[in-house]
Image: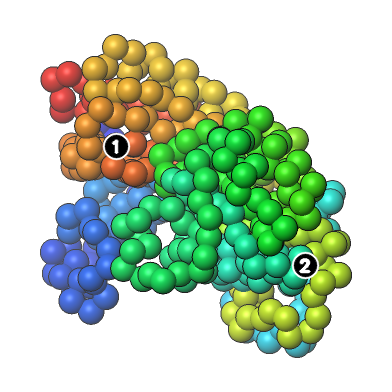
Amino acid sequence: MTNNDETEGAAPVTAAQSMAELAAMEEQYAGGTTARRGDVVMARGEGCWMWDVEGRRYLDLTAGQGVAMLGHSHPALSAAIAEQASRLIACPNFFYNDVRARFVAKLVEVLPDHLSHVFLSNSGAEAIDGAIKYARLATGRTGIVATMRSFHGRTIGALSLTWEPKYRKPFAPLLDVTHVPYNNVERLDAAVDENTAMVIVEPVQGEGGVNMGEAAFMQAAQRICRERGALLVVDEIQTGFGRTGHWFGHEHFGLQPDIICLAKGIGGGFPMGALAYTNRVHTALYPGAHGTTFGGNPLACAAGLAALEVYQREELIDRAAEMGQMLFDRLNAALANRTVVREIRGLGLMAGIELRERVGPYLRALMEEHAVLALPAGSNVLRLLPPLVISAEEIEIGVEAIARVLSDEGG
């Protein structure tokens, strides 16, 4: 089955320069830190599909690295951004703002009841950095415990929590952080002491390989934090807003974290991040303790408000659980007995296919031969983060392409 034809009624994207010329232009002026996948230049998106400047259509099972949860160019999101852009784009936080007020009220409405306050930032890494500051303020301590194979971002603070040495070593020394094995209660118990300000966990480790959190470990992390006065911080940047089939990934484990870090799906694809935290944390704050220029700007808040309303109106959280089950059923059936496949794992619409070989060549084959986009998670895991609006037919197209690429014959 092929899927690189134009959808009915859709016109090809045209550009004055060729794809190679545009790729070279971007690389010349903005390259150097990103590994590209050839010279593909994306120009347009709609739903679960993207088009390059030459008009080739791709099934996007990445949602733009997990951010376009509503798909590309959702009409409600696009309309909200356009309308707000015509009224007010920037508004400093020392003024109140109408759309910001409505957004934070809606955000707290969908959060678990014990998370009663929010701080709006620009990205997930900024949310992580904010969590470090808030935990230190609330506890008067400095120690941090994170997990091996974690990924929390690229700023110096977030990078300190991230495990992968290839990200960390060039920028050492970083903050002093103790890393313990994921899902190892004994090592976690030994690491948390009277100087620990926070323990940070991911409900599912995304970048680290789509590694599943175990209930015993998550619940032990909460108990240990409560017993020793540390804060439990949950990184929901990739798992939040329906990705795992619940509003937030920690709900699968019955947790009540002190702080959660949000981004990706919070704005439906528009750049935005946030901290959500308890009243205990809130009481430790004071004017000037933290701040931002762009965080909570009216344009981002309009996007976030529209996204939250779409999640509710279209019942996308429940739909993610339903379509996620379909995705795993189809993957397990289609990839049974594939010698290259070691394990299929994940939660909701967050899937990882662990391979016995490096994943890079398979990702390139998916894109080049089948026009299907997927992500790596470490060196040997093929990761799927499709938009929550994905259809059964689109799941079939994606799984069929993956099965063909991962067949013993390949192609």
Q: Which part of the image, by quadrant, shows the N terminus? A: top left
Q: Nearer the viewer, residue 122 or 158?
A: 158
Q: In the figure, is residue 294 to the left or right of 350?
A: right
- The quadrant in which residue 49 appears is top left
Q: In the figure, is residue 330 to the left or right of 305?
A: left
Asked if residue 271 shows in the view, the reply is no
Q: Which residue is found at the position 24% from the left and 23% from the top? A: 340
Q: Which residue is found at the position 26% from the left and 17% from the top? A: 338
Q: Residue 380: which numbered mark, if any?
A: 1
Is 197 above or below relative to 393? below
Q: Which residue is found at the position 76% from the left and 79% from the top? A: 97
Image location of residue 395, percent across then percent down: 42, 29
> Tag 2's secondary structure?
helix
The amino acid marked with disc number 1 is Asn
Q: Which part of the image, by quadrant, shows the C terminus? A: top left
> Tag 1's secondary structure?
loop
Q: Which residue is found at the position 52% from the left and 65% from the top? A: 176
Describe the colour scheme in one phrase.
Answer: rainbow
- The earlier-in-sequence mark between 1 and 2 is 2
Image location of residue 120, percent across then percent down: 67, 69
Image location of residue 183, percent across then percent down: 56, 35
Give the spatial CA distance, label 1 vs label 2.
Answer: 40 Å
Q: Residue 138: which numbered mark, if any?
A: 2
The amino acid marked with disc number 2 is Ala
Q: Nearer the viewer, residue 231 or 1?
A: 231
